[in-house]
Image (cartoon, rainbow, N blue to C red):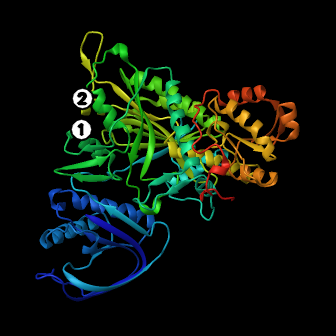
Amino acid sequence: MRILAIHAERFSYRVREPAIEKPEDITSRDGVWSNVLVAFTTVERNDNQDQDIAVKASGEIMDILSKVKADGVIIYPYAHLSQDLAPPEIAITVLREIERVLRENGVKVWRAPFGWYKEFELKCYGHPLSELSRRITPGVRVKKTFEKIYYIMDLDGKLYSPEDYKEYDKYPDLRALVEKEIFKKEGEGVRSRVSDYLRKFGFEWEGYSDPGHMRYSPHATAILESVTNYSWTVVKSLGIPVFRVKGTNMFDLSVKAVKEHADLFGDRLYEVDSEESRLVMRYAACHQQFAMLKDWILSYKDLPLGMFEVADSYRYEQRGELLLGFRLRRFHMPDMHILCKDLEEAMELTLRIRDKIFEEAGKIGRDYVAIINVTKGFLESSRDYLLELIRRDGKPALIVVYPDNIYYWVINIEYNIVDVTGRPREIATFQIDIGNAERFGISYADQKGVQKKPVIIHTAIIGSVERYIYMLFDTAAKMEEEGRTPYLPFWVSPIQVRIVPVKQEHIGFAEEIFKAVSERGFRVDIDDRDESLARKLRDAGIEWAYFVVIIGDREVKTKTLSVRERATGDQRVYSLEEFIELLEKLSKGYPKVELTMPHLVSKRPSLPYLREL
């Protein structure tokens, strides 16, 4: 089933003539509505194979309705969203069932008759959520709807309803989080420079692909590979054995464990057909790592044990919610799963993971505010653990309580920054999983040789690669907002060292410097163009080169380097050995990724993504 949902300021239709041999009986030939959600709906061939298809579709419609605040829903049969149509009798049955489910859930609903040519007029509001599409797939359940309970837990462990909590003035990031998550309020009218920065460095939408897919030009590739490699460094620093693996990005929904996991994940699934199989594109590394771990012979002596992959991941985010570098349909997830002997060991280890998550954010000057999703039973049994997490954060957290046995986890924490626009953005996460070891057949032998099911920690310590990069550029945007020069940390800057010879006769010494610096693994290039010094310095600034090394007569004569640092604005004179020592100090603990372009600027075309902001 496919749905195109339009939030209409005004909508009307009028029945003209039959479109099929036996159209549905008409109860009303026309109608006019205001502030209504029009659900243009195509029922497809296999939709009747899932008895819950109408419930799923209704859930999606109600989710959109709650966001756009329309007064009601019009179900409008629309055969033009797919070529794989259900027979008319099935389509009518499904559409009637959607109408019934919506009405039983208190929604004002009208349904246009099936099988007729109709004229209609529509005026769309035009806000970001006014045009959304949904694909409802038989056999894969969309997001479950159930009651969640919200609390604020303070540093003393007391629980407050969000409406009654009185300390928001002390914690503005918490206020922003609560307003978004509970009251669905977000800052309006504030434009971020982050998207400009991303495009400037070659993070762009790929117009030849599905919406939400990015391409990475040379500067972006250097940044992406640096962060990708760093994510491996981070997980190794936890002090447990970690195994790095690789795997496929699609899994067969006819496999019971894959299907059940997809059902629990709910909506936002990418699916493809292959011969007689229906495949789901992976949305994290769970499937691949669990498929491997079920074949490993494990002992209690092996645990805790981590498995890691930077997983090529896919989530079918809605077109109106896509955000360059942040909300994507295809992204890179540095996903680690840690097998633990029991829940107690998992809770102890997640405290270490929590500290590492905050440590990594702190390295770039950022802090997190937490959404702690927990089951009702875990909240009751583990209050002291939750309080310890919050005290380590040093601020209250939003607690969201779910019914027991809805998902496979007992706790799932989302760590959010509040970006330069005042909007919360989820970056890092961890969760404790008590269900998937049983589902995928993963076990270990305890001290007595008895097979036990491990508890599994899921974590992305730095978040997805793209979201971490988003946070880096958002940090730069905050610098600019404060009147400072924006920059990227040295280890992730696409051009770490730009050598600028003042004249052509200085290029020989510049090449000597290049050779010495590049041999140590740094991204260094030479602006060998026959341009003025002012033009070369301007262009180095456009590319945010972290260090600019100016080579003139004095530097050639004295064998010294005149170095300008972007982050501080300082300019100093170094010997080559002193400068390399500085570079090594700045890069300590971070990966080295080679230059992604020819090292001579004259050998590069005019790169369209590089432009001055």
Residue nearest the observer in this picture, 229 or 300:
229
Whether residue 441 is visible here, answered yes or no, is yes
| Residue at 19% over, 61% down | 47
Q: Alpha-carbon distance for marks 1 and 2? A: 9 Å
The kind of residue on which mark 2 rests is: Gly
SS at badge 1: helix
Q: Answer above or below: position of 77 versus 575.
A: below
Q: Residue at x 16, y 68 (%)?
A: 86
Whole-percent x and y of residue 138? 22, 56
Picture coordinates of residue 395 (x, y %)? 60, 38
Instruction: Check the image and report above or below for 411 versus 330.
Output: above
Spot the residue most to the top: 448
Residue, disc 1: 257
Relative to 71, is 177 above or below?
Answer: above
Image quarter hosting the C terminus: bottom right
**In the rendering, which numbered label is found on residue 172?**
none
Q: Are marks 1 and 2 in contact (CB under 8 Å)?
A: yes
Q: Earlier in the sequence, mark 1 or mark 2?
A: 1
Residue under the image location 27 percent in, 85 percent down: 118
- Is residue 165 something that shows in the picture? no
Regarding mark 2 in the picture, which secondary structure is present there?
loop
Residue occupied by mark 2:
441
Percent position of residue 516, x then y = 69, 30
Label 1 crowd bin: few (<14), some (14–19), many (20+), radius 10 Å: some
Q: Looking at the rendering, which quadrant does residue 396 occupy?
A: top right
In the image, 413 versus 40, the foreground residue is 40
Q: Amino acid at mark 1?
A: Ala
